[in-house]
Amino acid sequence: MKIRLLIAQAAIVIAGAAAVAGSASAQVVIVAPNAPPPVRVEPAPPARAGYVWDRGHWRWDHGQYAWNPGHWEVERVGYYWVPGHWIARGGAYRWRPGHWA
């Protein structure tokens, strides 16, 4: 089990390095070998004109999950905010960052 985890972590590092080396504008793909913990219940602050609230989420940080608290995103008129989320794929979990759609 530890060997599989080490292999998965090595693959993450290699994939990240390849993404960075491939293009300056390329986005690093975050891959975690196990599912994130349940999302924390975090009360949203009162509405703020010109901003949308991006709820907190778990991030993969040095081989473990760490909580990243919610924050404000500057509103883009004519778009809606799609929160970041983890996607299960091939026995691992990939982070899809929040974005405007």
Image: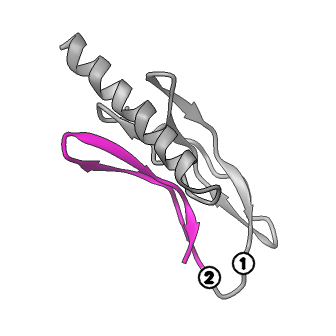
* SS of the residue under disc 1: loop
Horizontally, residue 69 falls left or right of residue 82, namely right
The residue indicated by pointer 1 is: 76
Q: Residue furthest top?
A: 2
Q: Tell me which amino acid carries mark 2.
A: Tyr
Q: Is residue 41 visible?
A: no
Please tell me how crowded label 2 is: few (under 14), some (14-19), or many (20+) other residues with Cα within 10 Å.
few
Badge 1 vs badge 2, beta-carbon distance below 8 Å: yes
Horizontally, residue 30 falls left or right of residue 49, namely left
The dominant secondary structure in magenta is strand
Q: Residue at the spot x=51%, y=22% of the render?
A: 62
Residue 40: give x, y in percent of width and height: 48, 37
- Is residue 85 within the magenta segment? yes
User: How many labels sit on residues?
Assistant: 2
Between 37 and 34, the one lying in front of the other is 34
Between 3 and 81, the one lying in front of the other is 3
Q: Quadrant of residue 68?
A: top right
Q: Which mark is residue 79?
A: 2
Residue 78: give x, y in percent of width and height: 66, 88
* SS of the residue under disc 2: loop
Q: What's the magenta region?
A: 80-101
Between 23 and 85, the one lying in front of the other is 23
Q: Residue at the spot x=80%, y=73% of the render?
A: 50
Q: Quadrant of residue 24?
A: bottom right
Residue 84: give x, y in percent of width and height: 50, 55
Q: Residue furthest bottom?
A: 78
Q: Is residue 51 visible?
A: yes
- Is residue 72 within the magenta segment? no
Q: Is residue 7 above or below residue 86?
A: above
Q: Is residue 99 above or below residue 85?
A: below
Q: Tell me which amino acid carries mark 1.
A: Arg
Q: Quadrant of the N terminus?
A: top left
